[in-house]
Image (spheres, rainbow, N blue to C red):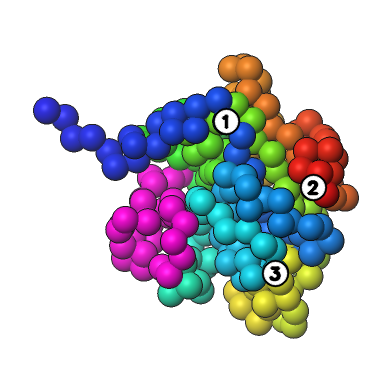
Amino acid sequence: MPDISPLARFENCHSGERIVLVCNGPSLNEMDLSPLRYETVFGLNKIHLGLRRFGFYPRYLAAVNDKVIAQEAPALRKMTAIKFITDRCRQLLPQDAFTFHINTTRIPEPFCHDIARSVREGHTVTFVALQIARYMGAAEVVIVGLDHRYTQSGAPNAPLRMEGPDPNHFSPDYFGGKEWDAPNLAQSEASYRCAREAYEREGRRIIDVTRGGACTIFEKARYEDIFGK
């Protein structure tokens, strides 16, 4: 019999449901996120830095940036969220009951419907999470904290070092004093368009409720209208 990927257990596990994708923008600090404790939340990268304040705990988490994983491996290892980690970092975060390795490639398209085979990084972990949520069968993904703006001095994807507090994320310690990769907003937007097209082709929705977010790709709505806060 052919080998069955450990990831296959997630196929359609949330068929027809809503998943809330929480990104890491500073706008999170301006919102009451406590209603998310009643939602199926998908966190990203260093979301653990804000969980005591935010009032929710993610059910899932994705991280594919090598620097993020290397910087936070001990903290990520302790999290009881189900984690999807690039297989490039399998030695830093070995597979266990909460950790699953995904085969990622650093290109934006095509949108992958079978994460057991491959996942496109598309220059943003948000795109990775959208592919996983689609594989889980989500009918609707609501995005929070996708600010889509950065203070930077470097070419897209260039390795940088953040001097002083981090102004680009919800925590000043996110990359403060640490190495990071300059964002590639143009390629990120290409990935977001790819995701929106893939979702809408199947009658699914991606709704962006980020407060003051600069991303114009997804359908917009007010956070308060969906979560009542």
Check disc 2 and give the amino acid type. Answer: Thr
Contact (CB < 8 A) between labels 2 and 1?
A: no
Helix, strand or loop at label 3? It is helix
Residue 109 placement (x, y as % from top left): 55, 33
Which residue sits at x=73%, y=34%? 207
Q: Quadrant of residue 156?
A: bottom right
Stretch of the chain drawn in magenta: 77-105
169 and 107: which one is in front? 169
Which residue sits at x=37%, y=56%? 99
Query: Of the residues under marks 3 and 1, which one precedes in the sequence?
Result: 1
21 and 194: which one is in front? 21
Please tell me whether residue 118 is drawn above or below residue 24 in the rendered image: above
Q: Is residue 198 left or right of residue 112?
A: right
Check disc 1 and give the amino acid type. Answer: Glu
Q: Quadrant of residue 130?
A: top right
- Number of the label disc, if any, that sits on residue 17: 1
Mark 2 lies on residue: 210
Helix, strand or loop at label 2? It is loop
Which residue sits at x=56%, y=55%? 58
Give the distance between the C-alpha atoms of the residues marked 2 and 1, in whole angstroms.
20 Å
Give the distance between the C-alpha atoms of the residues marked 3 and 1, in whole angstroms.
26 Å
Q: Is residue 30 left or right of residue 39?
A: right
34 and 96: which one is in front? 34
Q: Nearer the viewer, mark 2 or mark 3?
A: 3
Residue 194 can be seen in this image: no
Quadrant housing the N terminus: top left
Helix, strand or loop at label 1? It is loop
Residue 45 can be seen in this image: yes
Check disc 3 and give the amino acid type. Answer: Arg
Residue 92 placement (x, y as % from top left): 36, 68
Mark 3 lies on residue: 53
